[in-house]
Amino acid sequence: MTADAADVTAKAIAVDNSESVKKAIPTANAVPIEADLGDVKKEEQATQVDDVEKGDIEIAVESDFVDDVAPDITGVSKRLQQYSQADILYAITGYAGSIIVGALPAGEAVLFGMITGNFFTIKDAQEMRDTNYALSMWFFLLAGLSFIGNVCMGIGLGVSGSRLTRRMRVLVFDKLMRNSMGWFDFPEHSTGELTTSLEEDSETVANVTGLSQGQRIQVFSCLAAGLIVALIYSWQIGLTAIACVPLIIGSSIIQAKYASREPSTDSLIKPATLLERSFADIVVLQAYGLQTEVSLKYSATLAPDIKYKKKQAGYSGLAFGLSQFAVFGTFSVVFYVGIKMMLTGQLAFTDFFVALLS
Amino acid sequence: MFSSFGAGQSGANFSAKKEGLEAAARLFALSDGMADDDEDDPLSEEGSKPEIQGKVRFKNVSFAYPSRPDTKIYRDFTVDIDSRQSVAFTGRSGCGKSTALQLLLRFYRANSGSVEVDSEDVTNINIGWLRDNIGYVGQMPVLFAGSILDNIKVS
């Protein structure tokens, strides 16, 4: 603790003693504001205030941030499943919708490929018109399926996700209120921390079962339907495309692996705690003109987050680039193989086109 | 080709599931922090429910707040207060005036010694019952939303 911080503590306690700022919790018990002000030195502040307001500098943070150990998630899926058991029908409806929506592009590819193929393969104009007219009617079926699929997905997964969030919130809130007073005294259980956790984490939990899960199912359904159609129309093209799937999956894994690493620091308090303390003790803060110092400290608590976001952006950019590479690489290989096979007469144009498009 | 575009358009985020599971793990850790049979649980069914006369005794109590174990509030503190006796504690900040009430209400447990009501250790009395029998006006009085009558009914 620096001399400055100690000084501030003394002031804070002095005010606390006066009749004007009596608090329900005893002073000995209260987390002193000293913890919030930390070690940002006065001389640094003088030069940094302007820069911070412009938002373009980093404040030297006393501790290096280390990669946090991710929380243990074994067994969590099972418990979540239990909690979402009640909405299983909604979830099933949603997942069915996702599968339908995911399979649509493959159906679209079949129709599109056949219609386009007909332009080249059917010589008689009337026959071409009749065949393609009949084929184009099938798009109404796709439109209907798309409508039904999306409605099922939206309602089913929206409801099951939000209900899980609500259940988690109530469950945790219920338990928290029953904790002993001593538990709430610890800074990591401050109002700010608990509120943030209850709000943000509960919301994020919906990612496991809600719309987010539906989108992942949609991707699998999409790729599976595409590959099946490709295999039906040309097994060689289908197999070539399958060979490229590991690349696409690999890039997703890289993205997922680095996504959840959050920064942690040993000595810095979290932004939520600082905000909560500041607003709770706003009288002290204003009476002693600590706004600038506290605001600097707040900026400092946000700094590791910025570092984390930068790193995060790097990884997701890399993963996205890789997946794009995988997709375009697949196209080039499929085109190469397909054209070779067409030249040797092993593959008809329409079949190639449908397989390629799917 | 269409399928890969479709997959791209779905906006699926494969890291979201892991994030969701980790968030759930944090929430479970938070809610599991307290066991269901915790005897300091204010809703606990444990403990006796005696008729309370109001004799209070602090017997050789030592206490420090759990978050600041090095700052001892009481060392061997003993006091006897009779039923219907009015007592005022005075002293400088941090000397343990409010702490006495917090120990009596069992917001905290004494590290050693005992806090007794009618010669019964408060840790043996049902926590909800004990608190129901004590009128507590904090340093910052709280008025709940509603009428004055509603507020009186709460206590």
Image (cartoon, coloured by chain):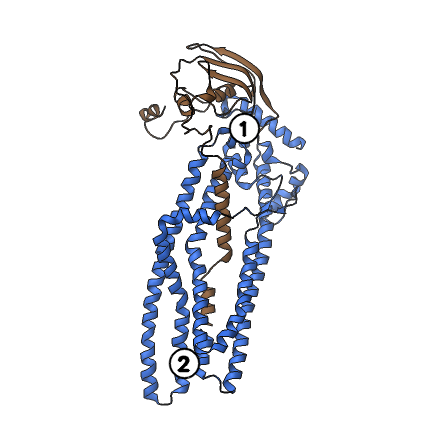
Chain colours: A blue, B brown
Residue in the foreground of this view, choosing between A88 and B97: A88
> Taking A294 as reference, is A81 above or below it?
below
3D distance between C-alphas at marks 1 and 2 = 75 Å
Q: Earlier in the sequence, mark 1 or mark 2?
A: 1
What is the secondary structure assignment of the residue under circle 1? loop
Quarter of the image where one finds residue A152: bottom left
Residue A192 is situated, as x and y percent measured from the top left of the image, at: 50, 38
- What is the count of numbered marks? 2
Residue drawn at 41 percent across, 55 percent down: A211
- Label 2: chain letter: A
Q: Amino acid at mark 2?
A: Thr
Residue B108 is situated, as x and y percent measured from the top left of the image, at: 50, 25
> Taking A304 as reference, is B2 above or below it?
below
Binning the other alpha carbons within 10 Å of mark 1 as few (below 14), some (14 to 19) or many (20 upward) gives: some
Binning the other alpha carbons within 10 Å of mark 2 as few (below 14), some (14 to 19) or many (20 upward) gives: some
Question: Label 2: which residue?
Answer: A116
Residue drawn at 46 percent across, 42 percent down: A198
Picture quarter with the N terminus of chain A: top right
Residue A203 visible in image: no
What is the secondary structure assignment of the residue under circle 2? helix
> Taking B112 as reference, is A261 above or below it?
below
Picture quarter with the C terminus of chain A: bottom left
Quarter of the image where one finds residue B37: top left
- Label 1: chain letter: A
Quarter of the image where one finds residue A348: bottom left
Q: Are marks 1 and 2 on the same chain?
A: yes
> Taking A307 as reference, is A132 above or below it?
below
Question: Label 1: which residue?
Answer: A30
Quick check: marks 1 and 2 in contact, CB under 8 Å? no
Residue drawn at 34 percent across, 68 percent down: A143
Residue A304 is situated, as x and y percent measured from the top left of the image, at: 60, 46
